[in-house]
Structures are given as structure tokens and as C-alpha cells.
Amino acid sequence: MNIPLSLYVHIPWCVRRCPYCDFNSHEQKGELPEQAYVQALLEDLRSDLEAVQGRSVGSVFFGGGTPSLFSARAIGAFLEQANRLVPFASDVEITLEANPGTAEAARFAGYRSCGVNRLSMGIQSLADDKLAALGRIHGRAEALAAVEAARQAGFENFNLDPMYGLPGQSLRQAGADLRELLSLQPPHLSWYQLTLEPNTLFHQRPPALPDDDAIGDIMDMGLDLLAGHGYQQYEISAHALPGRECRHNLNYWRFGDYLGIGAGAHAKLTGPDGRSVRSTRQRHPQRYLEGPRGRVSSVRTLSQQELPIEFMLNALRLNQGVPAGLFEQRTGLPLASISGRLQRGRELCLISPCADRLQPSELGRRFLNDLLALFEP
Ligand SMILES: C[S@@+](CC[C@H](N)C(=O)[O-])C[C@H]1O[C@@H](n2cnc3c(N)ncnc32)[C@H](O)[C@@H]1O
Ligand code: SF4
């Protein structure tokens, strides 16, 4: 099978929950069961081996929660054994998410020497008052120190993931923040708009956020700044210096396959019959650890009707879209099965006219929901 394969590993603990975050993360209470969790991850991976036989992993992503709460020894032990179970490609990209509040130079060096070659650092802002408003466990000084520590540890490739539209943020403040982040010359920036997610403290008690017009101004300013500094926007929120795009996320957006292990992780694998199967893992860390029965909480084969929207939800996030042939390769459906909807999208100027690509036009990027609605079953 020539569909690329990635491996996502979820580490579900944080020092403290941030009031805006709805990720599957649980407050750390006492010492983390590192060893038991690594064993559970490996057991989990073994249960998927049959489905990925003969394939190799092109990227690994430790996401969270806060993976940097785990020692380099635990991460290294996992990587070594996982590589024996499903071989990693020789140029494998291995990313680990790190919270600046848990960053120590020594730990970063340890990650680097056990094979992690990309860090993604949760630096929401460099303004102390905004970091406090976001309930972060670190301030500006720790954020700057984390970037320095990453470089010292030999990480040439790293991401920062600041947010904009923060409580009480003005256009000037957002510009100053982004300019300073850019002065750190990160190879990759994920620049997100702060959103109020259901089931978060911010949703219950919303802080005063900039209104839609102010957000529009911040976005225009930010996109100009990023482009002016040589960053290419390749996805809604992802900006990279040349060659520094995140290969792991690109595989999601190109509707590649991925194993997903760890509490609450999602996976998508193409079966021998060419059908895409999505599965999720038990969300609660304790119950996940208790596995193996009940570790997989849901398995669902995607129906032919939902494949077009599933594919487009990913592919149309990319500024360049994807080659048209990828639709058939990844979904098993003929391109002709969506030709009417593509034509409609082109008539509405939401899809670029180029027939050999499935690419959103500038208008389509701005009205992505309208564009996606064309592919709903
Ligand atoms: C798993 S966290 C990154 C690693 C680590 N847990 C941390 O926060 O430092 C993933 C990132 O998603 C983004 N994020 C989380 N909740 C968000 C929200 N409500 N709106 C926008 N971005 C959000 C933040 O940029 C956050 O750093
Ligand atoms: S933003 Fe990061 S540190 Fe904060 S709760 Fe979410 S996963 Fe944990």
C-alpha cells in the first residue's frame, strides 16, 4: 500500500489545565506513571501491527497534554521499541510538544539524543499579562529560555504556536507580540485564533475578546508580517520557512494514514479492502492504563457517502490543495463521483480553476465553510 503512514502518541497530563483548552488533558497529581504508560502505549501499538504490516512510519508526533512532562528516558525507551515494531523511515520526522514551563535544557538535550528531531513549543504569547490571563504556568522569561534551550540542545527544527485575539488584545499589542516572536526566527509558526471551546472555563465565563472587526485587522496585519518575514502560509494556521512544513500534519491534511495510540488518540487506517477505518482510544488515562480490553473505544468504517467531505475537510485546509489524483488514491472513489460538486465550486469561484488540483481559491479560503458544504453527503 503506498499511502503514507504516521504515528500519533498522546500524553494526557498537564501541570495545570488552561482555561481555554479542550484537549484531552488531565491535571497531574503526584508522580506520573511513566513506565506503565510507555508499556501500555507499546501494547496498544502491538494491537495494530497486523493492520500496518510491511509499512514504515514517516513521522511520529508526541502530542498532549504535555509530552515534555515525560523524561527523555521514557520517550527514548518508547521510540526504540516502537521502531522495532513498525520500522521508522530513515528520514523520519519526530516531533514532541513541550510546554515552556516544563522545559529544562537538560531534558531537551535528552530528547534530541533519543531521536526527537522537532519540538513544538506552547508559547501562546510573549506578553506576561496575556500569559497570566490565559492561566499559563510560564511567563515571558521561561518562553524565551525554552527557545534558547531548544537551540542549545541542537534543535534546528521547531515550531512555536502563539495565539491571537487574546483577552483585551489590541492590534498594536498583537503586532508587537508577533514581531517579537518572529525575531526569534522559528522555522515554523502555528498562529491560531483563540477560540472559546465548549466545556472550557473560558466558555462558561468568557473573557472580553476583540470583536470580529478587530480580529480581521489582526489577521490582515499578521499575515502580512509573516509573509514579509519569508514564512509561507501552507495551511489555515500553519506558516513555515522553506522546507520546514510539518510533515506529520501534512500527512493528515493529505488524508494519509495514521496510527493513534495513547489516551483519547484518534487513528485512521486504510484496510486491505481500501476502506478507511477511524478508531479512537479510551480518553481517561487511568482506564487506558487498565487496558487492553476496552482500550479502543470506537471503530468505524467510513461510508462511501461521507468520504468526499472527510477528504475535503483536510485537503482544502491547504493553501495549495492537493493533486486531483490524490482523491482517488486516498478514498478509492473515482474523481468523477464528485465532478458535479467540483464544477459547482468552480462556478462559485470557491475552487481554483486548475483541473489537475483540488485547491481552494482565495475566496474559498475565506469562505471555507461554504466551500466544504458542497461536499456534505
Ligand atoms: C497541546 S497544546 C501545546 C503543548 C502544551 N500542552 C502547551 O500548551 O504548552 C496545543 C496548542 O493548541 C493551541 N490551542 C489550544 N486550545 C486552543 C484554543 N481554544 N484556541 C486556539 N488555540 C488553542 C495552543 O496554541 C496550544 O499551545
Ligand atoms: S494548552 Fe497545553 S498545557 Fe494547557 S491544558 Fe491544553 S494541553 Fe495542557
Image (spheres, rainbow, N blue to C red):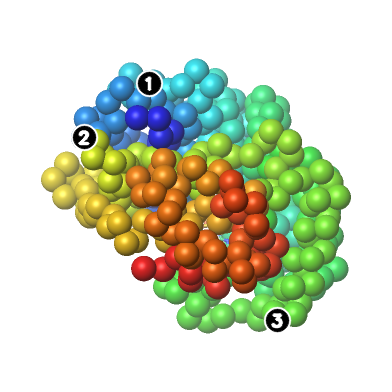
Give the image location of residue 54, x and y in percent.
31, 22
User: Which of disc 3 and disc 2 is earlier in sequence?
Assistant: 2
Quadrant including the C terminus: bottom left
286 displayed left or right of 344: left
Which image quadrant for residue 336? bottom left
Give the image location of residue 41, x and y in percent.
30, 36
Q: Nearer the viewer, residue 340 or 66?
A: 340
Give the image location of residue 237, x and y in percent.
64, 56
Q: Secondary structure at mark 2?
A: loop
Q: Nearer the viewer, residue 377 or 367?
A: 377
* Residue where numbered disc 2 is placed: 47
**60 shown above or below 19:** above
Q: Are marks 3 and 1 in contact (CB under 8 Å)?
A: no
275 displayed left or right of 191: left
Q: Secondary structure at mark 1?
A: loop
CA gap, disc 3 to disc 1?
49 Å
Give the image location of residue 339, x and y in percent.
47, 59
Q: Which mark is residue 87?
A: 1
Q: Residue visible at 30% across and 50% down?
A: 278
Type of amino acid under label 3: Asp
Instruction: Give the image quadrant in which the ligand numbered 1 is located.
Output: bottom right
* Residue where numbered disc 3 is placed: 211
Give neighbour class at mark 3: few <14, some 14-19, many 20+ (Cα, 10 Å). few
Q: Are marks 2 and 3 in contact (CB under 8 Å)?
A: no
Type of amino acid under label 2: Ser
Residue at the limit of the structure toward the left, as seen here: 293
